[in-house]
């Protein structure tokens, strides 16, 4: 089989566009030319890639397989360009990272600041995503690197452990739970919660755990940092579940009480997820080494 990179890029445009017309515009091709190219791809693969109707196009199961491979191939082409550009420019490259809430808000900004100061030609796209989207992104080549916490069922990926944290409950002085040695999450939800913003991995995780025991998360305020959560807890607005590292960093000065959670899932192994570390560009491998060598809080 002979694949044209332009055809693979075109197929990605189609998958990410609402219609063939929009995909044609993105690819700077006529609609007729797009149809011819897709038909040629289907003939070459002996598979139907698209369902077409008056409402637009839908990717077939065979098309989904091609899309996954196409994204990986195009990411590798980008890495190839950057690796050779490094030889010309001395230091260049682009790394895309999908990460959970703690990574994005707590330790990755400091790690990236140090890394980028020594790699002036490298750019980084760091995006907060849910765990399932992080895994999917690494699998289909949408992202180079994923950062997750807790168990992940993805045997196709390489998982690199780099640190461990645990989730704890923070409450204000004088709260009824402050003297409890341990507390179940289902018992803590009698009180209003201060949580991270909608869409954060931590909020999604807590909701999943509560749904399993028929409870819901009583969110009073949603914020964008653990520091802000601690300040709201200090003010007596509610209580919160945050990483122990964040509780120690912010809660100590605010004299918050830290209560252990009596749950099997509190310990969180932090991992880097990659498809194939040897296939990553040099700058991405160097970043992984730096993350492993940095004691993440």
Image (spheres, rainbow, N blue to C red):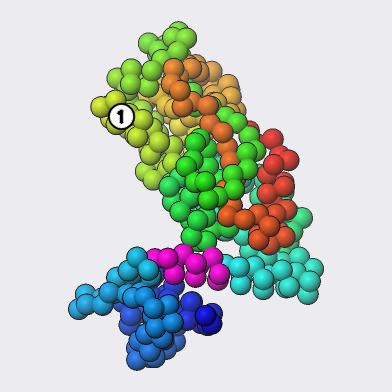
User: Which residue occupies the foreground of this view, 194 or 100?
Assistant: 100
Where in the figure is residue 279, as x and y percent of width and height? 65, 61
- Assign a secondary structure to mark 1: loop
Is residue 15 part of the magenta span, yes or no? no
Classified by dominant secondary structure, the portion drawn in magenta counts as helix
Please give the range of residues in magenta: 64-74
From where the camera sits, is residue 34 visible?
no
Which of the 4 image quarters holds residue 78?
Answer: bottom right
User: Which residue occupies the foreground of this view, 12 or 105?
Assistant: 12
269 displayed left or right of 208 = right
115 displayed left or right of 202 = right
Where in the figure is residue 60, as x and y percent of width and height? 32, 69
55 displayed left or right of 29 = left
* Quarter of the image where the C terminus is located: top right
Residue pictured at 62% horizontal, 60% vertical: 95
* Residue that carries the numbered disc 1 in the rendered image: 212
Where in the figure is residue 21, as x and y percent of width and height? 33, 82
115 displayed left or right of 56 = right
Q: Is residue 117 above or below residue 42?
A: above
From where the camera sits, is residue 153 visible?
yes
Q: Is residue 185 above or below residue 135?
A: above
User: Which residue occupies the foreground of this view, 153 or 235?
Assistant: 153
Residue pictured at 37% horizontal, 75% vertical: 47
Where in the figure is residue 208, as x and y percent of width and height? 35, 34
Return the residue found at the far left.
Answer: 54
């Amino acid at each position: 089989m002979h694949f044209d990179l332009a055809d693979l890029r075109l197929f990605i445009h189609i998958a990410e566009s609402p219609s063939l017309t929009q995909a044609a515009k993105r690819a700077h091709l006529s609609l007729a030319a797009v149809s011819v190219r897709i038909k040629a791809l289907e003939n070459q693969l002996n598979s139907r890639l698209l369902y077409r109707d008056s409402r637009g196009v839908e990717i077939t199961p065979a098309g989904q397989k091609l899309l996954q491979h196409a994204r990986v191939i195009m990411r590798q082409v980008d890495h190839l360009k950057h690796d050779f550009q490094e030889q010309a420019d001395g230091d260049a490259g682009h790394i895309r990272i999908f990460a959970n809430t703690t990574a994005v808000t707590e330790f990755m900004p400091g790690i990236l600041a140090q890394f980028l100061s020594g790699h002036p030609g490298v750019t980084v796209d760091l995006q907060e995503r849910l765990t399932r989207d992080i895994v999917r992104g690494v699998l289909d080549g949408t992202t180079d690197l994923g950062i997750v916490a807790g168990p992940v069922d993805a045997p196709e990926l390489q998982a690199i452990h780099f640190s461990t944290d645990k989730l704890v409950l923070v409450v204000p002085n004088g709260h009824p739970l402050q003297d409890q040695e341990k507390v179940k999450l289902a018992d803590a939800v009698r009180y209003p919660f201060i949580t991270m913003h909608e869409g954060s991995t931590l909020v999604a995780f807590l909701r999943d755990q509560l749904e399993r025991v028929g409870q819901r998360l009583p969110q009073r305020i949603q914020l964008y940092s653990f520091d802000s959560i601690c300040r709201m807890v200090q003010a007596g607005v509610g209580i919160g579940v945050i990483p122990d590292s964040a509780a120690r960093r912010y809660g100590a000065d605010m004299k918050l009480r830290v209560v252990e959670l009596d749950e099997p899932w509190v310990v969180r192994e932090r991992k880097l997820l990659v498809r194939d570390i040897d296939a990553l560009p040099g700058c991405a491998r160097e970043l992984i080494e730096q993350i492993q060598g940095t004691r993440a809080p």
